[in-house]
Image (spheres, grey):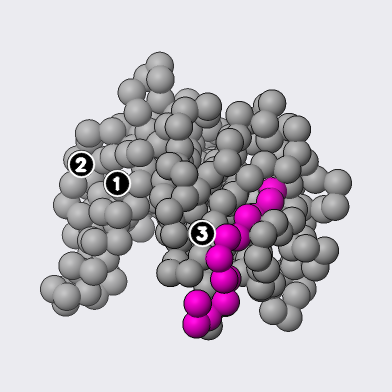
Amino acid sequence: MQPMIVPAGATVFRTGDPSLAVYVIEDGEVAISVGEAPASIEVARLHAGALFGESGVLEFRARAATATAVTVTTLLVTDAETFVHAFGMENDRALSLVRLLCSRLRGANERVVKPGQATLAPAASAQAGASIQLLPDHERLISEYAMKPLGVRHLPFQVGNRFGGEIIPFGSNHCFCIPARGEIELAAPHFELLRRGGVLGVRDLGSRDGTIVNGVVLNRGSREPFVPLHKDDNEVIAGRPKSPFRFRVRVTGAPSAGT
């Protein structure tokens, strides 16, 4: 890896550039954005230890996003050929699988939309026997973030903060992201809806302040960070009891196995 110092405000790479290297942040902060300026949308803030630029290298495609140094940033740079060989990608089957995963992530990022635009269609069945909706349960979600009832079509389905440390595409079929800049209580990602052993439930994703599901607190110290959901409305709070990031998960049909 070769060190590279990038001044604050400088571009590491732009959408459409050839994918010639992979980067690790040694010190500083990098913003990842999609779309063309001035309508581009920031989808992630990356900090020390974060890896970026690998998708384009593994897919042999041009950059699908723009990376910009927020502060003076020190990067460790690995050229594309070295990166591919270092991870044993001479195996054609392994490389094909990784490329497929990267392609799906890139496709999700390309579907990023602005807050207030349509996101998910009304729910069809997320799994056989159950229909799931994610609804706002706090005025701020409605007035400030223009959240509307969302149909959950695919599981697992993640909920989180679009301005956190991970890239979560806003409005994809697999997640709902709130552009809550400065709201550290809402992590990115924060929690997810999933089936475990045929049972529909909620799992906390290692968030700082935890998730409360029907009064049960899930956090990093929980032995089992998963709570099953019941029929009709379930209360899910991202964060502490007074958090404004309150949701209702409405389950129509049987949420457990064998239905």
Q: Residue at x 18, y 67 (%)?
A: 96
Q: Can residue 124 be seen in this view?
A: yes
At 28% across and 71% down in the image, what residue appears?
87
Q: Where is residue 15 in the image (x, y as percent from the top left)?
A: 28, 33
Pick whichever, 48 or 259, lies toward us. 259
Q: Is mark 1 on a helix, strand or loop?
A: helix
Q: Is disc 3 placed on a helix, strand or loop? A: strand
The numbered dot on residue 122 is none
Quarter of the figure with the N terminus: bottom left
Disc 1: which residue: 107
Foreground mark, 1 or 3, reads: 3
Q: Give the range drawn in magenta.
A: 247-259
Label 1 vs label 2: CA separation? Answer: 13 Å
Q: Which of marks 1 and 3 is nearer the N terminus?
A: 1
Which residue does the image show at 50% across and 82% down from the upper left? 258
**Could you tell me if residue 85 is visible in this image?**
no
Please say if 199 is above or below 102: below
Provide the residue designation for mark 3. Answer: 131
Amino acid type of the residue that numbered disc 1 sits on in the rendered structure: Gly
Q: Residues within 10 Å of mark 2 (few under 14, many from 20)?
A: some
Q: Label 3 is placed on what type of residue?
A: Ser
Confirm whether the magenta stretch covers residue 40: no
Q: Where is residue 38 in the image (x, y as percent from the top left)?
A: 40, 16
Residue 62's disc is 2
Residue 250 horizontal side relative to residue 116, left or right: right
Residue 233, percent from left and from top = 69, 56
Residue 19 lies left or right of residue 186; in this view the side is left
Q: Where is residue 16 in the image (x, y as percent from the top left)?
A: 22, 34
Q: Marks 1 and 3, Cα distance to the nearest angstrom?
A: 25 Å
Spatial CA span between label 3 and label 2: 39 Å
CA neighbours of label 3 inside 10 A, class few (<14), some (14 to 19), many (20+): many
Q: Is residue 254 magenta?
A: yes
